[in-house]
Amino acid sequence: MDRYAVIGNPIAHSKSPRIHALFAAQTAQALSYEALLGPLGAFAATVDAFRAAGGRGLNVTVPFKLDAFAYATRRTPRAEAAGAVNTLAFGPDEVLGDNTDGAGLLRDITVNLGCPLTGRRVLLLGAGGAARGSLLPLLLTEPARLVVANRSSAKAVALAAEFARLPSCAVAVKPEGCGFADLAGAQFDVVINATSASLGDAAPDLPDGLYAPGSLAYDMMYGKGDTPFLAAARAQGAGRLADGLGMLVEQAAESFALWRGVRPDTAPVLAALRAG
Ligand code: NDP
């Protein structure tokens, strides 16, 4: 049976084994999928051992996405743009590195939530790996405006400047970068939280009045009930709220499709996860 796994540290609470088991059952693919605890500082050795034992592919999560980028012998353009790899596929002659996080985010927002981004004012909060991986897919939807804001404003300014240098034939919209305080007076149709503030049970310190009527507040984090970011967005008048569980399932489906050549139906899997 073909072996797959998710590697991270910590990894015990990962939902990926359950998601991929549901995908495999639905598509009648004979495969196994496990959670692999990667010792810090020993990513490559752990992956080498997994491959030697018949591993065909890996999902990669915190803190190994940069190690996976370096491990790949070939990378997809979206992995190059993200500067990080969350999916490895092991072939006879190469290790392909991909990044499916941004595509998963886009699919969750535009398909599952039915919220188009084209022509909308989009605010992306954060300038870490998740924000970087989402920038190119977001730009390609041609929003009216895309602002990247971060607690340390210099990181957002640098990230936006990097993507603003892409040729305008490839990407028509130039992202803008700033700090949270610089957002005062601006309004957005979609606000995406790609900070890890919710992990520390906090919400980013944002000015009031950011949410346009009917706007979507989206937190890449997920959990039971509102995350701190979603609770703050609700209080500030966001029209719709969504957490990142759909993104998790959609990025997994992209990885599954890359490995197996068949795209699972994500709706029943997301419903099963929401049911507990
Ligand atoms: P990084 O560590 O790379 O980046 C963290 C970012 O959060 C930085 O921009 C940092 O700002 C900011 N930040 C941290 N604490 C606070 C705070 N208290 N207030 C404001 N900003 C803060 O993390 P990732 O980019 O890898 O992940 C970000 C989030 O996205 C995580 O919660 C992760 O779980 C989630 N995620 C979800 C996925 C899904 O499938 N649903 C997939 C990938 C990620 P500064 O630069 O100032 O330190």
Image: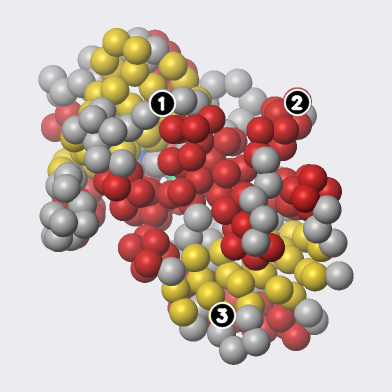
271 vs 61, left or right, is right
Q: Nearer the viewer, residue 181 or 97?
A: 97
Residue 230, numbered label: none
Quadrant the C terminus occupies? top right
- Residue 190: image quadrant is top left
Q: Are marks 3 and 1 in contact (CB under 8 Å)?
A: no
Amino acid type at image mark 1: Cys
Which of the two discs, 2 and 3, labels the residue nearer the N terminus? 3
Q: Pinpoint residue 249: horizontal percent, then vertical percent.
A: 62, 43
Amino acid type at image mark 3: Val
Q: Pinpoint residue 94: horizontal percent, then vertical percent.
A: 56, 85
Residue 275, numbered label: 2
Residue 95, numbered label: 3
Q: Nearer the viewer, residue 164 or 211?
A: 164
Q: In the image, which is nearer the foreground, mark 2 or mark 3?
A: 3
Which of the two discs, 1 and 2, labels the residue nearer the N terminus? 1
Q: In the image, which is nearer the foreground, mark 3 or mark 1?
A: 1
Residue 115, numbered label: 1
Which of the two discs, 3 and 1, labels the residue nearer the N terminus? 3
Q: Is residue 59 visible?
A: no
Q: Is residue 80 above or below residue 120?
A: below
Q: Are marks 2 and 3 in contact (CB under 8 Å)?
A: no
Q: Is residue 185 visible?
A: yes
How far apart in space, not on screen, are marks 2 and 3 (Cα)? 36 Å
Q: Pinpoint residue 265: horizontal percent, then vertical percent.
A: 67, 41
Secondary structure of residue under mark 2: helix
How far apart in space, not on screen, are marks 1 and 2 (Cα)? 23 Å
Q: In the image, which is nearer the foreground, mark 1 or mark 2?
A: 1
Who's the residue at 72% across and 33% down the image? 268
